[in-house]
Structures are given as structure tokens and as C-alpha cells.
Image: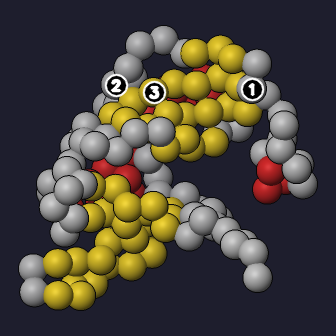
């Protein structure tokens, strides 16, 4: 049977509470789960509302240090409006908007230095019925 979806992306963090608050309160992710699974270890899982893929805030991978994550892209319908909302919440962006044939991008970092990008697609997302380009 083929792989059907991408379920969870691990985000390496130093302070799980600070990271949870950032992803929930600044980015607007929904808190899906928060529970202890081992002494001193918590499973904190969040996702954009309605998203199939979620993130978990990890502290337990010795070789995956806070700030090491790169290349996570978050789709938005209106990049300019979302950037304004996030700036009002105190988020700083890394440089200018990058306009490409496949959409517009704006990079930022979470409190641990993990680098993510907002993306306004130039065409409908795959989840909207597109097979990709």
C-alpha cells in the first residue's frame, strides 16, 4: 500500500512551553495534544486549523538541536495580510518577500531559531485538487 500522507514533523526546541506559546498564540496553530510520555518528556502536538500534517515540539533527540530545522513551508492565502498580522504579534521576518514563479515566500525564525517560510502559492495547493506542478 502506498504512503498516503505526511503525519508529523518534529521541531527541535529548547523550551517547550515557550515554543508551544509561539506556535499557538503567534502563528495561530491549534494545540492537539500535550501530555507526559516519559519522565521529563512531554508530547506537544500542534497544527494549523484543519491541516492534515502537524508538528511535535521535541527535546529528546540528541542529534537534532534547537534551531536546526529548515525548509518548513506554511501556505497562506494572502501573504501580505498574514505578514501584517504576524508583525503586529511581534514576529520579525528574515529579509524581503521572495517572488518566484511558484509563489511568494517570506522567511522567519521561531524562538529557537528554526527557519520557516510563509508561502502564497501561485496556483491552488495540491490539497485543492491539483496534482502538482
Res 76 quadrant in image: top right
Quarter of the picture holding the C terminus: top right
Residue 130 image offset from top left, x and y in percent: 89, 48
User: What whole-number distance in Å separates the C-alpha atoms at marks 3 and 1?
Assistant: 15 Å
Q: Secondary structure at mark 1?
A: loop
Residue at image x 26%, y 64%? 58
Q: Secondary structure at mark 3?
A: strand
Residue at image x 79%, y 56%? 127
User: What whole-number distance in Å separates the C-alpha atoms at marks 3 and 2?
Assistant: 9 Å
Mark on residue 92? 2
Q: Is residue 34 visible?
A: yes
Q: Which comes sooner in the sequence, label 3 or label 1?
A: 1
Quarter of the picture holding the N terminus: bottom right
Q: Mark 2: few, some, or many residues within 10 Å (few <14, many ≥20)? A: some
Q: Mark 3: few, some, or many residues within 10 Å (few <14, many ≥20)? A: many
Q: Which comes sooner in the sequence, label 1 or label 2?
A: 2
Mark on residue 21? none
Residue 113 image offset from top left, x and y in percent: 25, 37
> Which residue is under mark 1?
102
Q: Where 28 falls versus 2 (above or below)?
A: above
Are the residues at dot 3 and dot 2 in contact (C-beta closer than 8 Å)?
no
User: What whole-number distance in Å separates the C-alpha atoms at marks 1 and 2?
Assistant: 24 Å
Res 43 quadrant in image: bottom left
Residue at the limit of the structure toward the front, as seen here: 1
> Which residue is under mark 3?
107
Q: Mark 1: few, some, or many residues within 10 Å (few <14, many ≥20)? A: few
Residue 54 image offset from top left, x and y in percent: 50, 65
Amino acid at each position: 500500500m502506498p504512503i498516503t500522507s505526511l503525519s508529523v514533523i518534529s521541531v527541535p526546541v529548547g523550551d517547550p512551553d515557550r515554543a508551544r506559546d509561539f506556535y499557538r498564540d503567534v502563528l495561530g496553530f491549534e494545540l492537539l495534544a500535550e501530555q507526559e510520555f516519559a519522565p521529563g518528556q512531554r508530547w506537544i502536538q500542534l497544527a494549523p486549523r484543519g491541516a492534515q500534517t502537524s508538528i511535535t515540539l521535541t527535546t529528546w533527540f540528541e542529534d537534532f538541536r534547537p534551531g536546526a530545522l529548515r525548509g518548513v513551508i506554511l501556505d497562506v492565502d494572502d501573504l501580505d495580510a498574514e505578514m501584517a498580522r504576524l508583525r503586529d504579534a511581534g514576529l520579525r521576518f528574515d529579509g524581503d518577500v521572495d517572488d518566484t514563479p511558484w509563489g511568494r515566500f517570506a522567511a522567519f525564525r521561531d524562538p529557537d531559531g528554526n527557519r520557516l517560510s510563509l508561502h502564497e502559492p501561485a496556483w491552488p495547493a495540491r490539497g485543492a485538487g491539483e496534482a502538482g506542478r
